[in-house]
Amino acid sequence: MDSLPAERQRGLLSAGMFIAVLLVLFAYLDFALNIWPLKLAEARWRFGAVAVLTSYAPWLLLGAFMMLWSGQGAARPRALKVVAILCALQGVVLLGCLVGFPLDYLQIRRDVPDTDKWTFQVAAARAVFKLVLSIVSFGWLALAGNRASKDEGAAKPTRRETSPLIVGQERR
């Protein structure tokens, strides 16, 4: 991207950031519409909601990665910091899901017919696997984004110009 003129590069990075934000927003919107209406008191609903959330995790990860990439390319340390914080929060939310999911599994497994036990167990194992990988990935993105935001802030050179009014003075 260094070969592109700065103005075209900024435009492309801005479009990338916009698309990444849309990707994440659409994933959250689809997730919310799939689990509506909320029934937090029901173990079956919680189990299903976490399973549905794990199917949207790759889109959320891709969107977060694209935001970090665009933010770094555009040298936006604040955007990197915000996305890093959001990745950390998403990781914490998924960690909470990982703690509650096995409890819901234990609560509803006795209600699953014998003919569907295998499918139920595979679905639960797949959801736990996706949760663990998503938590690690969001944590990694949070750390990388935080580190990049510090690098971007430190890498900004201070521009010094000589003042036309005072001889020998530099402006910052």
Image (cartoon, rainbow, N blue to C red):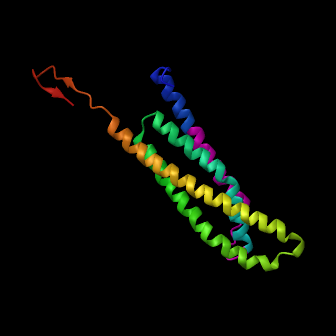
Q: Quadrant of residue 55?
A: bottom right
- Residue 140 screen position, x and y as percent: 51, 51
Q: Is residue 36 visible?
A: no
Q: Main secondary structure of the magenta part?
A: helix
Position of 9 relative to 98 (above/below): above
- The C terminus lies in which quarter of the figure? top left
Looking at the image, which residue is at 73% across and 59% down?
34
Q: Is residue 108 magenta?
A: no
Instruction: Please state the extent of the stretch shown in magenta in the rendering.
Output: 18-43
In the image as oriented, which residue stretches furthest toward the right? Answer: 115
Q: Is residue 113 visible?
A: yes
- Residue 93 screen position, x and y as percent: 56, 63
Number of labelled discs?
0
Looking at the image, which residue is at 77% across and 63% down?
123
Q: Quadrant of residue 54?
A: bottom right
Looking at the image, which residue is at 40% across and 44% down?
149
Looking at the image, which residue is at 68% across and 68% down?
38
Position of 69 relative to 97 (above/below): above
- Residue 120 screen position, x and y as percent: 80, 68
Q: 93 or 110, which is in the foreground?
A: 110
